[in-house]
Image (spheres, grey):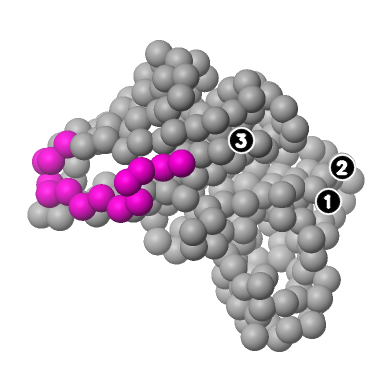
Amino acid sequence: EDQVTQSPEALRLQEGESSSLNCSYTVSGLRGLFWYRQDPGKGPEFLFTLYSAGEEKEKERLKATLTKKESFLHITAPKPEDSATYLCAVQGNTGTASKLTFGTGTRLQVTL
Amino acid sequence: DAGITQSPRHKVTETGTPVTLRCHQTENHRYMYWYRQDPGHGLRLIHYSYGVKDTDKGEVSDGYSVSRSKTEDFLLTLESATSSQTSVYFCAISEGHPYNEQFFGPGTRLTVL
């Protein structure tokens, strides 16, 4: 069974204070690892897909990296508008081919 | 934004009544999904569809049924609503391999009294 664990559950940063969110996973044959951002009362917004260990992707202040056991979402010089819950999900090779297994998220608050 | 709408956006109902939630997409994507999101559980897959009239169960399918008679519409029915089905329900779509990322709708908040 695929599993995803995200840490920390919550993180409070000051504006400009860089940090990283962790996503640890176990999966039978990784098809993809996905990062989403979710604002309160809204649906998850797609950020990145990573397919293989060593891959990195960037978007503005966010950079996602992948190893064989975990992924990190690095946030450089965050701003208050980066405050949101960040979700990680994996898709494995077995079982329901289209199924994503989600973690419970990291709630990020960035203050002035 | 991906062209996904959900209706209704909010609903309050009573235990034992049937409820149908609708998901509509304008992207012509093959795959459609229904998830529920509850505190401490993350997003969990209820049912999904891989084409018109082709559906399959997810990990929390008991008490739910789905139908897809057109590419653009995916309906989720709670046959007899229970308080444990109080949740936020999200619809998602994807093109399928190799574009496996899923795009989510705005959600429906359902309260069962």
Regarding residue A7, the answer to whether it shows in the image is yes
Most extreme residue toward the top is A54
Q: Which mark is residue B54?
A: 2
Same chain under badges 3 and 1? The reply is: no
Q: Residue A2 bears which disc, if any?
A: 3
Residue B21 vs A47, above or below: the answer is below
- Which tag is nearer the camera, tag 3 or tag 2? 3
Tell me, yes or no, whether the two marked residues, 2 and 1, touch with CB atoms within 8 Å. Answer: yes
Task: Please say whether residue A10 is one of the residues in the magenta stretch.
Answer: yes
Which residue occupies the foreground of this view, B62 or B4? Answer: B62
Contact check, label 3 and label 1, Cβ < 8 Å: no
Tell me which amino acid carries mark 1: Arg
Q: Quadrant of residue B103?
A: top right
Horizontal side of A39 relative to A30 (left or right) equals: left
Secondary structure under tag 1 reads strand
Q: Residue at x 61, y 35 (%)?
A: A2
Which chain letter goes with mark 3? Answer: A
Q: Secondary structure at mark 2?
A: strand
Graded by Cα atoms within 10 Å as few (under 14), some (14 to 19) or many (20 or more), the crowding at tag 1 reads many
Element under disc 3: loop
- Write down the region rendered in magenta: A5-18
Q: Nearer the viewer, mark 2 or mark 1?
A: 2
Residue annotated with mark 1: B68
Name the amino acid, label 3: Asp
Residue kind at label 2, given as amino acid type: Asp
